Amino acid sequence: MGIGEIKQEFKEVNYSSEAAIIEFIDKYENDERAGVINIVNSAKKKLDELKKEIERSYNMRSFERKYYDMGYNYICGIDEVGRGPLAGPVVTCAVILPKDETILYLNDSKQVSKKKREELYEIIIDKALAYSIGISSEERIDEINILQATYEAMRMSIDNLKIKPDILLNDAVKIPNVNIHQVPIIKGDTLSASIAAASIVAKVTRDRIMHEYDSIYPEYGFADNVGYGSAKHIEAIKKYGPTPIHRKTFIKNFV
């Protein structure tokens, strides 16, 4: 087989499967052509990266394993996105992942590329036993403050789950007025697969909302800044004034 064909085969390997990578390596490891040796070495590097990711993902489920062992069956991760922006809603997500399902590459949504977030979003909503979104609008944020609006959205996401959780793993906070056992975890979106999954679904959901607003208010660059206070965004507020989706309590220094 020509080197070009082997390169193409290399591109088509499923790099989320140890067996598929090992099969490719075994197939060409004894080929002495320099170009093939380089391809095989690249495959070995991919295999090492995958093994590290499998180990990291296993560690990301340590909290889940702990509470499964304590008898909790439906473990729900909760996170929010959008507490800091000048415009748009705060979005929360509650996710219950399957007990025996490991989803690779879950992490804090800010540490995952946009492309990978979109891929993981589809995997999470496909594999989750249940997931739900909660949204507090910019009006509600102005009315009751961002922290209370975030708690309200979190309660909404919990209440709308089709399965009632036995326990909640929260990113750092304890949600008031919730009668389910809660475990606040500092930096939970980097330590718990369930919280990381919630972070990613919330982030993709909110980004899509802000992209829709960008088509309505193109001067503010919402497709790029998703409502955060970039220099271009602040300049647009000063030049054009606020839109209906701006948080009045967040932009009073600019208006």
Image: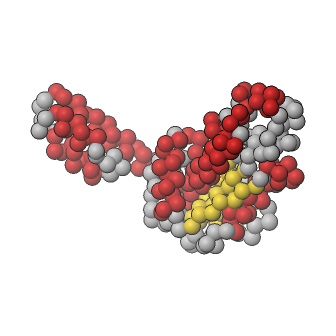
Q: How many marks?
A: 0
* Residue 53, percent from left and from top: 42, 46
Who's the residue at 52% across and 40% down the image? 113
Who's the residue at 19% across and 38% down the image? 6
Residue 89 in view here? yes
Q: Is 1 placed left or right of 101 in the picture?
A: left
* Residue 28, percent from left and from top: 16, 40
Looking at the rendered image, the quarter that the C terminus falls into is top right
Task: Please tell me which residue lies in front, 38 or 144.
Answer: 144
Residue most extreme to the front: 216
Task: Place residue 232 in its image quadrant.
Answer: top right
Looking at the rendered image, the quarter that the N terminus falls into is top left
Task: Please tell me which residue lies in front, 241 or 27.
Answer: 241
Task: Place residue 180 in its image quadrant.
Answer: bottom right
User: In this figure, which colouring scheme has been used for the structure?
Assistant: secondary structure
Task: Please tell me which residue lies in front, 170 or 225.
Answer: 225
Q: Is 161 placed left or right of 141 in the picture?
A: left
Who's the residue at 49% across and 42% down the image? 115
Q: Is 30 placed left or right of 41 in the picture?
A: left
* Residue 101, percent from left and from top: 45, 62
Who's the residue at 85% across and 48% down the image? 142
Residue 40 in view here? no
* Residue 148, percent from left and from top: 82, 54
Task: Please tell me which residue lies in front, 17 or 53.
Answer: 17
